[in-house]
Structures are given as structure tokens and as C-alpha cells.
Image (cartoon, rainbow, N blue to C red):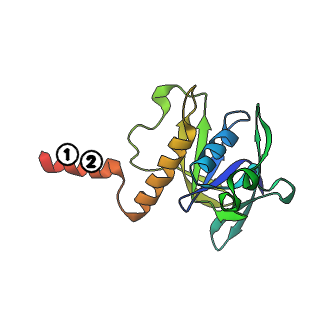
Amino acid sequence: MQVHGALVQVQGVGVLLLGPSGVGKSEAALELVTRGHRLVADDVVELSREAGRLFGRALERIRHFLEIRGLGILFVPELYGAESVLEQCAIDLVCRLDPNRAPGEFERVGWERPQETLAEVALPTVRLPVRPATSLGVLVEAAARDHRMRERGPSAAARLDALRSEEA
């Protein structure tokens, strides 16, 4: 199975960036690479399921290349070093980049992450607003860090709610 998107490993979390063409998936991936994270795939992500987990990799002919409107084709290891890319990684989180929703339609508290199923594997998903001057790389990095924290314990929203309950 293949999806149109970008895959980046952010501090050990495989983040699949999805959204309409031209929304900024490649630019977000480039921003993440410049912040020290690793590109796995851009444009087409090949998916495979192994032992109940979903993995992604680039098609061989476009592996480690990024297409950035206004710049053209970039070869990431040449610009950022061999450590800036990976052949494949597990996909742990889906970030849907959404330019079309009204501000009130985005999650504000984050009790639970909705699930999205790809290749019969359920994955936590966040929808991120795309607006002018939005730093998508920063938002995606925060989503990956939050995902890691949620794996270790309750969400920030649950912790805040517990504090409010203690004060009452």
C-alpha cells in the first residue's frame, strides 16, 4: 500500500504527515530535518505491516529526495549529512495537516487521540491547522513529544484535570 505524504522520525517517533497536495508536508519535513530529525520518505510513502505494526519507507528511486516548491529537488543527505535520513521506520503517529477547517473545529484539550486505520493498523491521529506563518515543524515535533509522554502516562489534559480536582 502507498500513501501520498511524508514520513519523518522525530525523536524516535515515526510521524506520517498527510494532507492535500500543496499543504506543506514536504516543507514541514524539511523543517524537521533542519531541527535534527530524520527523513524517511517524501511524496510517496510505501507502507508494510509487520507483527501488527505499520512501517513506512520511500520508493527506491526517490529515496532521500525532497521536492520543495520554489527550490526544486533537494537530496537531503548531501545537504544535512547521512544521519539526516533513514531507510524505514515504524509509524507511531499520523499528523493530518488541514488548511480547511475553521479554528473552532480543532481539538483544544486533547483528552484522547482519535484513531485512524491504515493497512489495518489503528494509529493515533492529530489534526493540525495550516495557516500563514504557522511553523508546522514545531507543531509536529510537539505532537511527537506529546505522543511519547502519553505512552508513559496520562495526557497533560488529564494531569491538569487531576490538579483541578485536588484543589476543589
Question: Disc count in the image?
Answer: 2
Residue at left 39%, top 64%?
Answer: 152
Q: Which class describes the residues within 10 Å of circle 1: few (<14), some (14-19), or many (20+)?
A: few
Quadrant in which residue 84 is drawn: bottom right
Q: Secondary structure at mark 2?
A: helix
Residue at left 56%, top 38%?
Answer: 136
Tag on residue 152? none
Residue at left 54%, top 31%?
Answer: 134
Q: Position of residue 154 (x, y in %)?
A: 35, 58
Is 6 or 137 nearer to us in this picture?
A: 137
Tell me, yes or no, whether the two marked residues, 2 and 1, touch with CB atoms within 8 Å: yes
Q: Is residue 168 left or right of residue 152?
A: left
Q: Residue furthest bottom?
A: 51
Q: Position of residue 89 (x, y in %)?
A: 66, 64
Q: Quadrant of the C terminus?
A: top left
Q: Position of residue 115 (x, y in %)?
A: 54, 52
Which residue is disc 2 drawn over?
160
Q: Position of residue 166 (x, y in %)?
A: 15, 51
Tag on residue 164? 1
